[in-house]
């Protein structure tokens, strides 16, 4: 493994760990000693080569697909315009499953595709809202109002949706 590749891999490992709010010692504690802070730190700095097996185990520990840890893979479409709609994932977790189930599954898919595992908020695009509206059998504006009433979407979303439909 080239040292440049190891550093890029390490940067991805560090990004996932910090997205999840974990320190190196936090990883060791959460894994009950399975992942030593000094070892994970050396992977992150690119000082130590990680085997495919260990990388797969580390991806599993973090709850992310292995390909998200590999250099050269860019999550999502970097060329897309900035998102205007932000879902509050923490509030979404408190909405009853029978109401929020489709949205929770859709959000989990987007997180996986983008490699975005912070678990607090998730930006969605107008196309995502239109797709969700089809799933919920509502217009985007009616769905937006429902998501606002659940506390999952900020009231500012009305402007983005109103502009889109108007």
Image (spheres, rainbow, N blue to C red):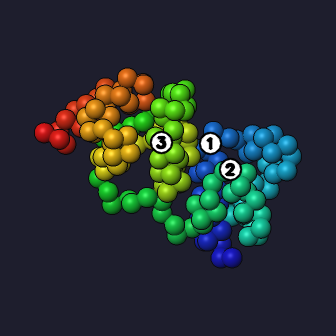
Name the image quarter holding residue 139: top left
The quarter in which the N terminus is drawn is bottom right
Determine whether, in the image, residue 65 is placed left or right of residue 100: right
Q: Comparing marks 2 and 3, which lies closer to the viewer?
A: 3
**Viewer-closest of 89 and 77:** 89
Determine contact: label 1, label 2, CB under 8 Å: yes
Question: Who comes first in sequence, dot 1 or dot 3?
Answer: 1
Task: Please give the residue where the numbered disc 1 appears in the rendered image.
Answer: 20
Within 10 Å of the Cα at label 1, are there few (<14), some (14-19), or many (20+) other Cα atoms? some
**Viewer-closest of 160 and 72:** 160
Task: Please give the residue where the numbered disc 3 appears in the rendered image.
Answer: 102
Residue at image coords 78%, 41%: 30
Determine contact: label 2, label 3, CB under 8 Å: no
Which residue occupies the extreme bottom position in the image? 2
The label number, if any, that marks residue 62 in the structure image = 2
CA distance separating discs 2 and 3: 24 Å
**Viewer-closest of 11 and 101:** 101
Residue at image coords 47%, 47%: 106
Question: Who comes first in sequence, dot 1 or dot 2?
Answer: 1
């Amino acid at each position: 493994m080239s040292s440049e590749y190891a550093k890029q891999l390490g940067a991805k490992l560090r990004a996932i760990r910090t997205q999840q709010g974990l320190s190196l010692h936090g990883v060791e504690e959460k894994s009950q000693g399975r992942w030593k802070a000094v070892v994970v730190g050396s992977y992150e700095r690119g000082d130590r080569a990680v085997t495919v097996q260990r990388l797969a185990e580390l991806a599993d520990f973090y709850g992310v697909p292995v390909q998200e840890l590999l250099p050269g893979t860019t999550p999502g479409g970097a060329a897309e315009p900035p998102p205007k709609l932000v879902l509050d994932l923490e509030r979404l977790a408190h909405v009853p499953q029978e109401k929020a189930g489709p949205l929770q599954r859709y959000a989990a898919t987007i997180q996986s595709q983008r490699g975005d595992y912070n678990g607090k908020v998730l930006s969605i695009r107008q196309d995502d809202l239109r797709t969700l509206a089809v799933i919920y059998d509502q217009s985007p504006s009616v769905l937006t109002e429902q998501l606002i009433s659940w506390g999952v979407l900020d009231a500012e979303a009305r402007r983005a949706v109103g502009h889109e439909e108007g």
